[in-house]
Image: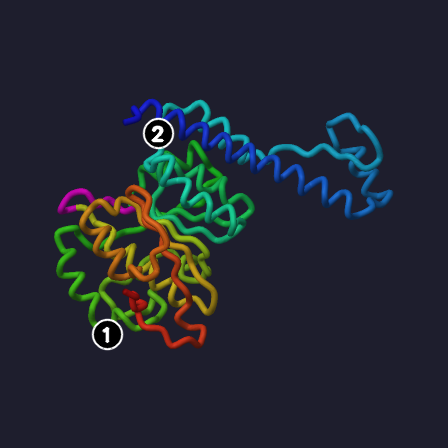
Amino acid sequence: MRTKAHQSLNLKFLLVGVFLGFLLLFFLRSNLSLDSKEPTNDNNARRSSSSKCPPHDDTQTCTKIPPSLAQTLIHYTTSTITPQQTLREISVSARVLEKKSPCNFLVFGLGHDSLMWSALNYGGRTVFLEEDEAWIEQIRRRFPTLESYHVTYESKVHEADNLMDVGKGPECTAVSDPKFSMCQLALKGLPSLVYETKWDVIMVDAPTGYYDEAPGRMTAIYTAGMMARNREEGETDVFVHDVNRVVEDKFSMAFLCEGYMKKQEGRLRHFNIPSHRDGSDRPFCPTLLD
């Protein structure tokens, strides 16, 4: 079994590799856009006056690393704190973001991996929902570019069995906007932008759920699934972390559906949920084939 130190080192190598790969793609795209369009004299004049790099010819410009990516690269290569997810778990989500970014990415939770998720969705919108106001302020001081909002959860882990029974009722299986849902599991007090945005990727890695009085992730998992079903068309990739725990295990299977699950890696499950408003007559969960 690999030691924690080796896992942390491998995770840093993965992060550095991802960012270096992104930077290479960034430079290639920049060069291709320059080659495909002949610059005008006005453009040449602007580049000559604003570029801080010595000009090599009339078509080259100085392309810099975006500040947010530079900050992320420096942070993770110098940090001794290991993100909440393992290298193999992060790789699953990173592959989806590689295909979908820039996109709209909603994350339940604000943690040591948040800067990484934002950078992997560079050019898109990444929003974090966090239960701890003091923690939000601490992260904002360190990383002011991250977009985060405080949310309040009314549920408790010890209510999970009752909420599971509630979730089987018709008011909870009917597809609707969670903001106006009659289901007790639907989160209705989130910022308006959360309901108004079509999310391409959703990560449920919060709220706290490891003791009875903690809010638990019952409502977050249910709401993520309904947001995916309620979009007008297309599909949403939903990830749930800590599925080794009873709540995350049962609620992800019940409300994100085993039939929509694409992969499980360690404590992470990946679901791909299609729109239920695109004209297709879909059941709440697809039937599993033997």
**Where is residue 45 shown, x and y percent of the image?**
83, 38
Asked whether 117 or 263 is in front, the reply is 263
Secondary structure of the magenta portion, mostly? loop
Looking at the image, is 97 positioned above or below residue 45?
below
Q: Residue furthest front?
A: 290
Tell me where the magenta segment starts and ends, as one range. 206-213
Residue at 20%, 54% in the rendered image: 155
Q: Which residue carries the number 1 mark?
A: 170
Which of the 4 image quadrants contains residue 178? bottom left
Dot placed on the residue nearer the N-terminal end, 1 or 2: 2
Q: Is residue 284 left or right of residue 49?
A: left
Q: Is residue 161 visible?
A: yes
Looking at the image, is 155 positioned above or below residue 38?
below
Looking at the image, is 194 positioned above or below residue 148?
below
**Label 2 secondary element:** loop
> Disc 1 to disc 2, how far (Cα)?
42 Å
Q: Which residue carries the number 2 mark?
A: 82
Asked whether 74 or 195 is in front, the reply is 74
Mark number, residue 99 = none
**Where is residue 224 shown, x and y percent of the image?**
34, 58
Asked whether 127 or 63 is in front, the reply is 63
**Where is residue 281 shown, x and y percent of the image?**
38, 77
Asked whether 127 or 87 is in front, the reply is 87
Classify 10 Å Cα crowding around label 2: few (below 14), some (14-19), many (20 and above). Answer: some
Is residue 172 on the magenta stretch? no
**Where is residue 77 shown, x and y percent of the image?**
46, 25
Classify 10 Å Cα crowding around label 1: few (below 14), some (14-19), many (20 and above). Answer: few
